[in-house]
Image: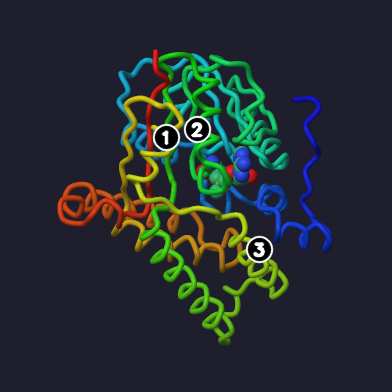
Amino acid sequence: MSSDPAPTPHATAEQVEAAWHDPKLANVLYHDWEAGTYDEKWSISYDERCIDYAAGRFRAAAPWDGRPYLRALELGSGTGFFLLNLMQAGVAERGVVTDLSPGMVAAATRNAEHLGLEVEGAVVDGEHIPFPDDSFDLVVGHAVLHHIPDVEAAFREVLRVLEPGGRFVFAGEPTTVGDAYARKLGQWTWKATTTLTRLGPLQGWRRPQHELDESSRAAALESVVDIHTFDPADLERTATRAGAEGVRASTEEFAAAMLGWPVRTFEAAVPPGKLGWNWAMFAYHGWQRLSWLDEHVLNRVVPRSWFYNALITGTKPR
Ligand SMILES: C[S@@+](CC[C@H](N)C(=O)[O-])C[C@H]1O[C@@H](n2cnc3c(N)ncnc32)[C@H](O)[C@@H]1O
């Protein structure tokens, strides 16, 4: 939207100080700072690999008859990973990418333009969505609910802007148990990588110290921006209380998360571009194999709350 605020990619010390007590400001600063390098940091692409991943999460969360939704809204779109790849998979025809961070909205609309997709962008707080009632037939989000202070208010807003019968799908939310082991694995990997890359022959794999320091400071802000972890049954109750119908939460990634978190942390700890395409394919295929194990074997014996990722879907009553 033309009145959207400008990004703040380099926050002042005063802004960072204020952000410690204001999770929304922290989210804006943290994600504006991340926006320029986010796709690289998280190995996000807009090709078959991520199209399959996004469409796979959508199908894992919700029934889909293969017909495209006509007008979709994404909350907390970041650089557009979820909705842009869902559109490329044929899940939605037209879309609006929104985020609290102006830097992320700019990145997402740029990505959409490169892909030739019909997409608008707007800076939006998920607790107060500035669109009229019944505007969309689909609302999606990936890894956004855990950043929103009042998740029930966000669900109420999602239901308000959905037309009757319209569906929401949120994926990539951390479960409480999953988040505990993922954080530990991430911390150990960071420590091991940044220690080993001090050694002579491995120094070419070390990021400049000021970049590592900046990442560590950002990681500290993560404790402010990451507000919630979810128990799947509680998340279902929250969406139902907000007025949704047919609510269903599912979970995925147990063994896959045990590989995924160390891999992603390692990628962030070494210089960008150092690992290349073969590494990305190794990581993706490894994740695929372990996801198969999770889906076909482990989900029969491991409680659903132990899996890392929660997905939730539901509809607006007709
Ligand atoms: C972890 S990132 C995920 C980005 C993207 N969906 C993805 O999966 O790559 C979370 C995003 O949610 C946004 N966000 C945080 N709080 C929000 C809020 N209250 N309303 C809307 N978006 C928010 C952040 O700015 C950030 O871009």
Q: Secondary structure at mark 3?
A: helix
Q: Earlier in the sequence, mark 1 or mark 3?
A: 3
Displayed quadrant of residue 260: bottom left
Residue 208: x %, y % from top left: 69, 73
**Mark 3 close to ligand 1, CB under 8 Å:** no
Q: Earlier in the sequence, mark 2 or mark 3?
A: 2
Q: Are marks 1 and 2 in contact (CB under 8 Å)?
A: yes
Name the residue at 55% across, 30% down. Answer: 74
Q: Which residue is mark 2?
A: 155
Residue 219 image position (x, y, % from top left): 61, 65
Quadrant of the rendered image containing residue 99: top right
| CA distance for labels 1 and 2 | 6 Å
- Tell me the kind of residue under disc 2: Phe
Which sits in the foreground, 112 or 101? Answer: 101
Mark 2 burial class by Cα count in 10 Å: few <14, some 14-19, many 20+:
many
Please, what is the three-letter code of the amino acid marked with disc 3? Ala
* Residue 167 in the figure: left or right of residue 23: left
User: Quadrant where the C terminus lies?
Assistant: top left
Q: Is residue 164 visible?
A: yes
- Residue denoted by label 1: 239
- Per the image, label 2 sits on a secondary structure element best described as helix
**What is the number of the mark on residue 218?**
3
Circle 1: residue type: Ala
